[in-house]
Image: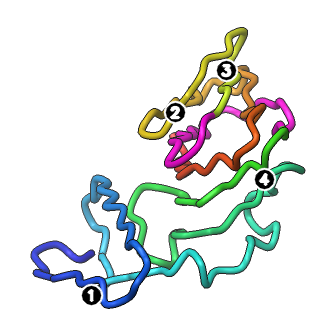
Amino acid sequence: MPEGLEFTMSNTGDEMLFMYLIAEPVPAGFTPKREVVVKDEKAMALRDQGYLKVHWSHNGKNVFTAPDGLATLLSVNYITFDPMTIGQPHSHGPRLEEVWTVISGKNLAFLGKEIRWQTAGQAYKIPPTGTTPHSNINPTEEPCRFLYFSKLK
């Protein structure tokens, strides 16, 4: 959403409409897009293993990337973990930050040496140290859905 642009959203369909507003800092010299960028998650294909490999149990969709107009974030993704699945525990190289935010369902977040229940509206951040193992575990009978954010530090 370009700065200063007024807009109105209306749901003209029969299904519930979900809208996520994501604000990020805009660095000096960044030129934002001039138009609003809107994505329909239901119409999007699963991501194609491009810039960020999907771990074997993720069902991921690239919602926004730099070409869409992100200023500081590397990506915003929609990730679904099917029931009774786990993402491959792993660490990243230094500088990559990740934030996993549950938007529906219940997740067992594995971060470092700890595991914690995570429910809708809760998020955790993986520090950009390159040494923190992490994963998501869905031991429930329902899918768990996330908004995932990544950024290079």
> For this rendering, which residue is in front, 40 or 89?
40
Q: Which label lies toward us, 1 or 2?
A: 2
Between discs 4 and 1, the one toward the N terminus: 1
**97 inside magenta stretch:** yes
Q: Quadrant of residue 11?
A: bottom left
User: Residue type at mark 4?
Assistant: His
In depth, the one of 55 and 104 nearer the eye is 104
**Start and end of the magenta stretch?**
86-106
Which circle's residue, 3 or 1, is located before the other in the chain? Answer: 1
Q: Which residue is mark 4?
A: 58
Nearest to N terminus: mark 2 or mark 4 = 4
Label 4: element kind: strand
Residue under pointer 2: 119
Q: Please name the residue shown 57% across and 49% down the image.
A: 146
User: What amino acid type should be assigned to the residue bearing mark 3?
Assistant: Leu
Which image quadrant is residue 59 in? bottom right
**Picture coordinates of residue 67, whole percent (x, y):** 52, 78
What is the x, y in percent for residue 150? 56, 49
The tag earlier along the polypeptide, 1 or 2, is 1
Q: Position of residue 23 (x, y in %)?
A: 29, 56
Give the mark toward the camera: 4 or 1: 4
Disc 1 target residue: 34
Residue at left offset 54%, top offset 57%: 74
Q: Secondary structure at mark 3?
A: strand
Asked if the residue under mark 2 is in contact with the one under mark 1, i.e. CB atoms within 8 Å, the reply is no
- Which amino acid type is marked by label 2? Thr
Image quadrant holding the N terminus, namely bottom left
Identify the residue shown where x is 56% and y is 40%: 100
Element carrying mark 2: strand
Residue 111: numbered disc: 3
Q: Separation of disc 3 and disc 1 at Cα?
A: 39 Å
The residues tagged by marks 3 and 2 sit, at their Cα atoms, a distance apart of 15 Å
